[in-house]
Amino acid sequence: MPEPARPAEPALPEDLARRLESRPRPGRRRIAGALASLVLLLVLIGAGLPLLAGADWAQILAALSRLGAPLVLLAVLLGLLSLAAEAAGLHLMLPGSRLLRIAPAGAAATALGLAVPGGGLLGTGLLGWWLRREGLAASTIIIGLLGFSLADMAVSSVLVPLAGLVAYVLAGARLELPGTLAAGAVAVLGAAAVVGGIALVLSRPVLASVIERLAPLIPAAASALGIRDALMGLLRRRGAGLLGLLVASRLLQLLVLLAALRSLGADVPLAVVVAVFALGRMLALVPLTPGGAGITEAVSAAGLVALGVPGADAAAATLLLMVSTLLVPVLGGGIAAAAGALRPQRSSDGPSSSS
């Protein structure tokens, strides 16, 4: 049987395609904000974490030494595997790409998004520029990044909070964390808002109605419907696999916290660990510090202390988790970015940027 014909590539606005040709650079305000957030991170880790955990740094360092080098290496390995799972998901959404080529690009974009508060768009721009240098068509890049971003938003803002709520219910009376009612309400409202927003964006009748009104004012809006149709086709074919890889990435991070608590002898039920982890991942979305670090560790440690975990052990466990969720992605992405900047540009062998 003859192979089915590939759908036509959607037309892209010229200015959108041109943005992929230049590397995004953070402005002075962004750099100043990053430095300020780094100072805030150091203050939160240096003073806030011991305060909320109820342990001084001598006790925390002693608990960290009890974890041992093998567990630290395990946290680094799981952090790298988490990055690899996300890179595989990105590869899945970019037909024609090569995994070994885009993995460094994904790592560099993740590092930029974590290191600079609110730098998610900057990281996405860097990723698009990098992929264009690799010869991918602009339409492939834009549609793939849209699909990946929507799936990542669904996992971070919907599945993780809901998993935390389910774990909270399963834990029952054993889980008496401060502020759980407010956190639960925020999680439900946030998840509902994200689901509603994604549904509206992907709804063809709604989008067509919006385009009809905007087209006279913004001619480029007419291309949105073609982009939406191509995106939906890609998500139908590969969305389930992408969601599975992103969920696997979070589970690998969860294993770090679970292994740390078990190694320290903390008798914490699995449902409780899941709930604390989900709370921390929700706090990581707050763009005040790099990757939400400092706030995440301090609040998570306070939650573990409220559940009966010794303060030093709680702080050590959350710091080990930070190795996997922040230090490994930032350092690995920085190395990948430096290596990529030195590599010569490949000639573009894909379709033209406006195809």
Image (cartoon, rainbow, N blue to C red):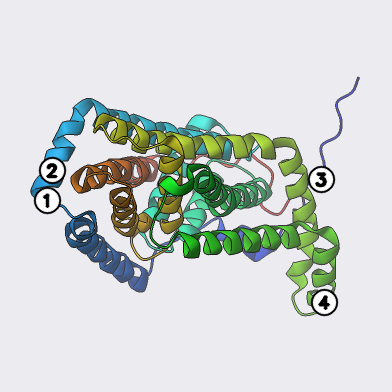
Q: Earlier in the sequence, mark 4 or mark 1?
A: 1
What residue sits right under mark 1 in the picture? 57
Q: Determine contact: label 3, label 2, CB under 8 Å.
A: no
* Residue type, label 1: Trp
Q: Earlier in the sequence, mark 4 or mark 3?
A: 3
Q: Nearer the viewer, mark 4 or mark 3?
A: 4
What residue sits right under mark 3 in the picture? 8
Q: Left or right: 260 with respect to 169?
A: left
Q: Earlier in the sequence, mark 3 or mark 2?
A: 3
What residue sits right under mark 2 in the picture? 61
- Residue at 76%, 55% (x, y): give it: 228
Q: CA distance from mark 4 to mark 1?
A: 60 Å
For the residue labelled by badge 4, is the local secondary structure a helix, a strand or a loop? helix
Q: Quadrant of the rendered structure where residue 319 is?
A: top left
Q: CA distance from mark 4 to mark 3?
A: 25 Å
Q: Quadrant of the N terminus?
A: top right
Please state which of residues 173 and 233 is positioned toward the viewer in this rendering.
Answer: 173
Q: Is residue 84 above or below residue 138?
A: above
* Residue type, label 4: Arg
Q: CA distance from mark 3 to mark 2?
A: 59 Å
Query: Can see residue 228?
Result: yes
